[in-house]
């Protein structure tokens, strides 16, 4: 069985480039509606008109804003699927196994960079910096997990070996459970309830509104997102949705028995005794 490729910072950078957000962040210009030109091209073949009609949104400006919201949700689904495929315990364990060698090579590249920086040769400095950045290294999220586990920054081969051993305990064969579709459906339910209050699932925990189901299926099909067919597997699809909370049973308070009012004789006797 071939070893899995290591999970590196390059995987994170590749996912970021798919959104186009780093370019906009550098120019300090936020895209309109949060949708970058790369996202627009990504969603060029998605048509949410039928789903927006199901919501009952008529005004053109509102339809444009609703479409942007749906694009963000579906793009985020693709990113979550990529992240789940990349950030497996097996790939993380492989990265921790190679981290000690990466750390040594990065240290050598860093020394070479400072040596060339003293020569004040811009081309050599840029070349050394580019070489240092291209070196494989752990993602920041995995570095943070390592620090939380050890209580300090891992430095030795033994530190990385201990982290790899703990990560391998979570690794297993076969597919891992995906949460991308469930989270996407929950986000679509929030979107539907925001634009149309009648599509809020707040009653009858067993059966969501039919228009809400229709809206969800229309969006998922438009974005080519694989999902259970509600007509063939209704219970499996509904199990992915965000159900309303169970009604809280009101505790009936038993009325306290009121004591009878004292008679005139008892009242006067009480005043005498006091």
Image: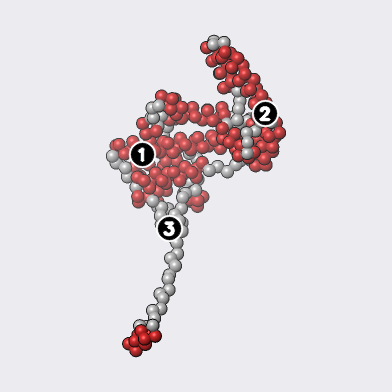
Image position, residue 189 (x, y; %): 42, 46
* Residue 94 shows in this picture: no
For mark 1, give the secondary structure.
helix
- Identify the residue under disc 1: 66
Res. 100 mark? 2
Callout 1: few (<14), some (14-19), or many (20+) C-alpha neighbours within 10 Å? Answer: many
Res. 85 mark? none
Give me the residue at 46% from left, 44% from top: 185
Vertical position of residue 45 compared to residue 115: above or below: below
- Left or right position of 23 against 52: right
Vertical position of residue 154 compared to residue 258: above or below: above
- Identify the residue under disc 3: 204
Image position, residue 226 (x, y; %): 50, 40
Give me the residue at 67% from left, 28% from top: 100
N-term-proximal mark, 3 vs 1: 1
Image position, residue 167 (x, y; %): 65, 39
For mark 2, give the secondary structure.
helix
The quarter of the image holding the N terminus is top right
Inter-mark Cα distance, 3 to 2: 56 Å
Give the number of the mark in front: 2 or 1: 2
- Left or right position of 2 against 184: right
Image position, residue 21 (x, y; %): 44, 29
Callout 2: few (<14), some (14-19), or many (20+) C-alpha neighbours within 10 Å? Answer: many
Callout 3: few (<14), some (14-19), or many (20+) C-alpha neighbours within 10 Å? Answer: few
């Amino acid at each position: 069985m071939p070893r899995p490729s290591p999970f590196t910072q390059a995987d994170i950078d590749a996912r970021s480039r798919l959104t186009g957000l780093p370019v906009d962040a550098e120019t300090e210009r936020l895209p309109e509606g949060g949708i970058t030109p790369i996202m627009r091209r990504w969603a060029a073949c998605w048509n949410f008109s039928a789903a927006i009609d199901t919501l009952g949104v008529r005004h053109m400006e509102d339809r444009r804003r609703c479409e942007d919201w749906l694009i963000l949700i579906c793009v985020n689904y693709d990113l979550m699927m990529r992240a789940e495929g990349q950030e497996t315990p097996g790939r993380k364990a492989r990265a921790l196994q190679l981290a000690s060698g990466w750390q040594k090579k990065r240290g050598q590249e860093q020394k070479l960079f400072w040596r060339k920086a003293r020569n004040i040769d811009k081309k050599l400095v840029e070349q050394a910096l580019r070489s240092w950045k291209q070196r494989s290294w752990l993602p920041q999220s995995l570095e943070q997990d390592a620090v939380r586990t050890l209580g300090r920054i891992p430095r030795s081969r033994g530190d990385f070996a201990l982290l790899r051993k703990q990560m391998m305990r979570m690794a297993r064969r076969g597919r891992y459970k995906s949460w991308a579709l469930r989270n996407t459906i929950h986000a679509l339910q929030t979107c539907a309830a925001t634009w149309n209050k009648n599509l809020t699932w707040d009653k009858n925990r067993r059966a969501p509104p039919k228009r809400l189901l229709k809206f969800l299926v229309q969006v998922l099909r438009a974005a080519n997102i694989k999902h259970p067919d509600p007509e063939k597997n209704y219970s499996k699809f509904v199990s992915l949705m965000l159900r309303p909370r169970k009604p809280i049973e009101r505790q009936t308070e038993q009325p306290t028995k009121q004591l009878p009012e004292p008679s005139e004789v008892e009242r006067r006797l009480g005043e005498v005794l006091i």
